[in-house]
Image (cartoon, rainbow, N blue to C red):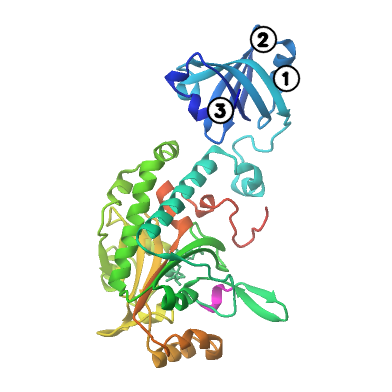
Amino acid sequence: MEYTSIDSVLSDEMIGKKVRLRGWVYRHRVIGGKVFVVLRDSTGIIQCVVDSSKVPQQVFDDASKLGLESSILVEGVVCREPRAPGGYELHVSDLSVVHFTRDFPIKGGEGVEYLLDNRHLWIRSRKLTTVMKIKHRVLEAAREWLLDNGWWEVTPPILTASACEGGATLFEVKYFDKKAYLSQSAQLYLEVLIYGLEKVWSLTPSFRAEMSRTRRHLAEYWHLELEAAWYSMEDMMKVSEELVAYIVDRVLERCRRELEFLKRDTSILEKSTKTPYPRITYDEAVKRLKEKGLSVEWGDDFGADEERVLTMDFDKPFFITHFPRHIKSFYMKPDPGRPDVVLGFDMLAPEGYGEIIGGSEREVDYDKLYQRVVEEGYDPSDYKWYLDLRRYGSVPHSGFGLGIERLVMWIAGLDHIRDAIPFPRFRGRIYP
Ligand code: 4AD
Ligand code: MG
């Protein structure tokens, strides 16, 4: 007899059928002559009842001694049991132990640092497993949308010789006898690739040496980036909202059970499947923040607090556009009608989450870009290849980057970004 998955036996059609299951002990208690084992596999949990009067003595003894997270094989008959989690249980006829576990270090109620030290064990928790399933669906949906809309997937480098998003958050690595950096963004390389492929995207790890620990910053995160020739900022904003709306729609369709398990209120997610998303300018955002009593001045960059306050006005993702030039990256194209602001946009997720996407139209003029490289304090010789793009068939183009964990955090309704990635990296944490 084959082994079946737990989710496939949780149905009325399975009542009375004999099945084999395998997995890990999720809960365990002995009451009188019965052992109640809640078994967990990748698909769910089911209560298994081992009755001393119905199994050989050895099986009952083994079942009695099981510690949490022991791995076992069971055989039994599926029964309806409204009091059991999920509404069904297995009446066990045979059970064998693959590995006895004693004293699993996570018993419930442990603190955050302890759980992070034991991440390799905590990661099998139902909550983190559920979030990983949602992340899988997010990545699947993104890929589907990009395939359906004619975007080429490309593979930019992770080891780089120059900064994309400012020197402050660069991770330096020894590269033979030279210095190199871990990529903060694939953007500059994607810009290269549009001359052959026009519409490109990549999914890569990006690295940021963020000095402070916040709820939404990782030192290593998964970055989905798009870049397209001939696209204006407006064109790119449309792409970004269509992509996000599609992802949310697919997750709602494919992750009903997962969202329910996380007790996610999906009303705002439902609204977020409809585009267009609202837009406000940076000027308007400053005005709104001042009206709400925050002390911001034109020219300030927004942090998590400002963004949280702004999200309260919206019930779906929204854009902030036309940021002051000096708070944004060197490659952004200034607004021709108003050169103190750039043709840049952020997409913010509602419900307090804030920035999930940063994008812009790019500067395409050689001299202007050269000047911005110098102003930024970079050595232009490091950027010769990037500047070259403005010498040979320069075209208007735009792109953006989406932080996958930021998106997952919002969709899953997590209160901290660390749970959107199996092995979170941030200052002071590299183990396990
Ligand atoms: O806004 P950022 O810095 O923009 C860029 O890197 C552009 N070069 C992207 C492009 O146009 N191709 O980063 C883009 C997104 C942010 O909106 C955020 O979602 C995510 O990356 N992000 C982070 N996610 C987790 N931890 C961090 N430390 C992050 N920094 C940025
Ligand atoms: Mg940004």
Residue 426 position (above or below residue 104) = below
Q: CA distance from mark 1 to mark 3?
A: 22 Å
- Local SS, label 2: loop
Disc 2 to disc 1: CB gap under 8 Å: no
- In the rendered image, residue 351, in percent from the top left (x then y), is placed at 35, 52
Above or below, 413 against 297 in this view is above
Q: Nearer the viewer, mark 1 or mark 3?
A: 3
SS at circle 1? helix
Q: Looking at the image, tell me whether mark 2 or mark 1 is earlier in sequence order.
A: 2
Q: Position of residue 420 (x, y in %)?
A: 51, 51
**Sooner in the amino-acid sequence: mark 2 or mark 3:** 3
Which residue does the numbered mark 3 point to in the structure image? Answer: 4
**Residue under circle 1?**
62
Res 3 visible: yes
Q: Which mark is residue 52?
A: 2
Residue in the picture at 42% in, 69% down: 200
Residue 312 position in % (x across, y down): 30, 55
65 displayed left or right of 284: right
**In the image, which residues are magenta?**
166-170
Residue lying at 46% horizontally and 21% vertically, measured from the top left: 87
Query: Horizontal placement of 186 versus 106: left or right?
Result: left
Q: Nearer the viewer, residue 303 or 7?
A: 7
Mark 2–mark 3 Cα distance, whole angstroms, equals: 25 Å
Which quadrant of the figure has residue 364? Answer: bottom left
Q: Main secondary structure of the magenta part?
A: helix
2, 209: nearer the viewer: 2
- Please state which amino acid type lies under the numbered disc 3: Thr
**Which of pointers 1 and 3 lies earlier in the amino acid sequence?**
3
Secondary-structure class at tag 3: loop
Alpha-carbon neighbours of circle 1 within 10 Å: few (<14), some, or many (≥20)? few
Label at residue 214: none
